Amino acid sequence: MSSLCLTAFTMTSALGAGLDATRLALRSRRSGLRPGPWRDVALQTCIGEVDGLDQMALSANLAAYDSRNNRLAQLALAQDGFSDHVQRAITRYGQQRIGVFLGTSTSAILSSELAYRQRDPHSGALPEGTPYQTTHNMYSVADFVRRRLGLQGPACVVSTACSSSAKVFGMARRMMSAGLIDAALVGGVDSLCYTTLYGFHSLQLLSGQPSRPFDVERDGISIGEGAAFALLERESLAQAGDVLLTGVGESSDAHHMSAPHPQGLGAQLAMQKALTMAGLQADQIDYINLHGTSTPGNDSAEDKAVCALFGQQTVCSSTKGHTGHTLGAAGAIEAVVCALALQDGFAPGGVGTQVLDPALHCNYLLTNLDQPMQHVLSNSFGFGGSNCSLVFSLKSV
Amino acid sequence: MSTLSIHVDGIGLFGPGLSGWSTAVPVLTGEQAYVPAPMQLPPLDALPAAERRRVGTAVKLALSIGFDAVRGAGADAAQLATVFSSSAGDCDNCHNLLEALASADRSVSPTRFHNSVHNAASGYWSIATGCMAPSTSLSAFDATFAAALLEAATQALDSAAPCLLVAYDTVYPEPLHSLRPIASPFGVAMVLNPQRTEQSLARLEIGWTSNVDTSMADAALESLRRNNPSARSLPLLQQLARGTPDKVVIEYLDTTNLALTVLPCQ
C-alpha cells in the first residue's frame, strides 16, 4: 500500500476549536499561549489552554469517562463535521472494519492526581468511586472515542511521549495494508496535568516566557493541550485537492532517556525513511513542520538533522509557539497543520521567535509564506529517543 | 478478515515461579507442577550502570524477557524493530509520582518523570542494545497483549523483517492496586518473523473470532492469566510449549477476540 487519503480531519488547541479558528490564528500569527497560573500551579510559565473544558459534560451514557482528557476528545470530535464523516464511513465499511488508534502521553492522569490529594489520612485509600479504567489508564481515550462513535474495530493507544500521535499514522497504515481494516480513525489527545508541568519543571525544560523555537534566547517549552483527529481511507477515494499520507518514518535514538542525540542521528533516520516510503527526494519537500520544542538541545539537534538531509533551503517552522507543546497530541496536531498548509498553499511562520539563533542554519520562517505546495514533512520526536516523521502530499488533478 | 501469518522464532518469559522460557516449558505442558513464587529476574548487565540504577521492576522485567526471546531466536537485538506493550507502564513509578504531586511542594525527581513515559522500557532497551530501528509502545487495558501481537505481526509483515514483541505488566501499590488489582508481575516477549528460520518454533495464523477466550486448566495459571493483562498470552504460550497444532483464543476487545492457529515448525 503506497498512500492513504485523509478524508476528514480536525484539530482543537489553544488556538481555538476546529479548523476555521486554527486557520485564522495561523494567518494572523496569533499565539494561544497565556501566562499562568493554571489551576493552583504556581510555576512561572506560559500555558496553551483549551477554553471551556471545565464547564463541559460528557454524554450521560459515557459519564464514567469524565475527565479533562476525554472532554477535550469530545470537544474536538464535535468540530468540522468530523463525527458525521466517521458515521458515513461506518455506513460504507461497517463498525468492525474501522480501527481507532490514538496517541497520548498522560491520558487522564489529572483525575488520579486530584484523587491522591483526597486520600484517607488513615488508610491511604482513594475517595469512594474513584475511577481508573475510564480515566487514568492509557487506553481510556481510545475506549471513549470508540464508544462515543460506535466503532467496533481494532483499537489501542500509542504512548511514546511526544511522538505518540504521529506514530498512530504508521500503525493505521500497517493495519490497513494487512487487510485487517478498511479505514482508521487516528489522532492524539493530551491535556494539562500536574505530571507534565512539574515534570518538565524538574528537568529545567519549562520556559518562563512563551516558547521561542529556534530563537537565540530560547530556554524551554511552553506546555499546551490539544486534540486532533484524521480519518484515513484508501488512496483510491482521493480527489484532486485531498491530502494524502505518503510517507511514515520511525526510528529510535538509542542515546538518552530525556535528551536527543546531539547530532540528530535518530531524527535523520526517521526523516529519510519517510522520504523513502514517499518515493521523494529531499528537495521535493516544500515545507517542514519542525518538532521545534524551543529547548536549546532539541532545536539544535533537529537543526543539524534537517540541514544534513535537506541543506539550508527548505522552508520550515515550528508551530509550538502558537499552540504550546501539546506533547502526545503534537504529532496529530501538526499533521493537521501540514494538511492545512497543503490545501491553503500557506506555510505558517513561527511565532514567539524574535532573533534566530545564528548557530542554527535551517531556513526558519518568521513570517507567513503563501506558496503552492505539493509535499510537506512533519517531525515528532519524544523522550526515550522515539522519532517519527510523516510526509503529506496534495492529490494532483 | 485476511489472516495474518507469522513465525515465532524465540520466546522470553518471566513471572511468579516462571524464570525464562526454557524452564517454563515443562510447567506449561504439565510435566512439572506450577508453583507460584516471587518473580526472580536475572542481573541486568546489558544496561550501563548509570541507567541500571534508575530503573525499577517494570523496565527490568521488560528487558529480561526481551533478551530471553532474542537469545532463543538467535537474533541481533541491534537490528530488531520492537513493540513494547503494557496496560499501565511502571506502576511503582506512577504511584511515587502521584504521591509527590499530592505533597506540599510537589517536587518530583527528573528521573521519576522521564521514567513515567509509557515508552520508558523501549528507551532503555534501545540504549542497552544500540538499536535505532522503529519502536512502538502501546496500551489497550485488558486487550493489551492481543493489540501488541497484532501490531508486532503487522510491523514484521510490513517491513519483511523480524519484530520483537515485549509485553509486560507489573503490580500497582495501594491505593491504585484496589482500583486495578494486577496480582503479580508477568512478562512475555516473542521474536515474530515473516520468514521461517531454523529457530522458528511455530507458525501463527491470526484471525478474529467471537468465541470466548481459552482458559488454563491449572487453577493457579488461570488465576495468573486473569489477573495480569500480559498473562492473557498464557494459552498461546502453553500451545507453543506443547509443540502440537491447535487453536487458542486470546482476549481482545468486547466481543471480538483473536483466534490463533498454532502450527509447530519443529
Image (cartoon, coloured by chain):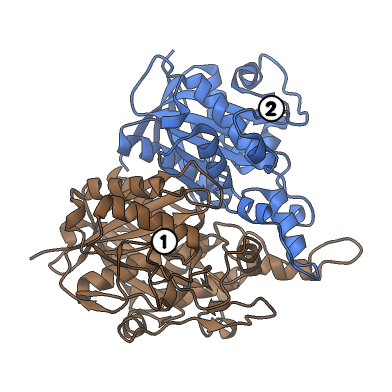
Chain colours: A brown, B blue
* Chain under callout 2: B
Q: Nearer the viewer, residue A273 or B165?
A: A273
Horizontal side, residue A4 vs residue A109: left or right: left
The x and y percentages for residue A6 are 27, 64
Q: Chain of mark 1?
A: A
- Compared with A368, B39 (above or below) is above
CB-based contact (under 8 Å), mark 2 and mark 1: no
Residue B226 showing in the rendered view: no
Residue B13 in picture, x, y percent from top left: 60, 28
The numbered dot on residue A151 is 1
In-image side of A230 versus B239 (left or right) = left
Which of the 4 image quadrants contains residue B161?
Answer: top left
Residue A281 visible, this angle? yes
What amino acid type should be assigned to the residue bearing mark 2?
A: Pro
Mark 2 burial class by Cα count in 10 Å: few <14, some 14-19, many 20+: few
Q: Which mark is residue A244?
A: none
Measuring 18% from the left and 50% from the top, which residue is drawn there? A281
Residue, far front: A358
Picture layout, residue A142 above or below residue A224 = above
| Image-based side of A180 in relation to A262, left or right | left
How many numbered circles does the render carry? 2
| Three-letter code, disc 1 | Leu
The disc placed on residue B43 is 2
For residue A388, above or below residue A359:
above
**Of the pair B30 and B6, the residue shown nearer to us:** B6
Q: CA distance from mark 2 to mark 1?
A: 44 Å
Q: Are marks 2 and 1 on the same chain?
A: no
Residue A137 image offset from top left, x and y in percent = 61, 58
**Residue placed most toward the observer, B5 or A261:** A261
Between disc 2 and disc 1, the foreground one is: 2
Q: Position of residue A22 (x, y in %)?
A: 36, 80
Name, please, the residue furthest toward the right. A122
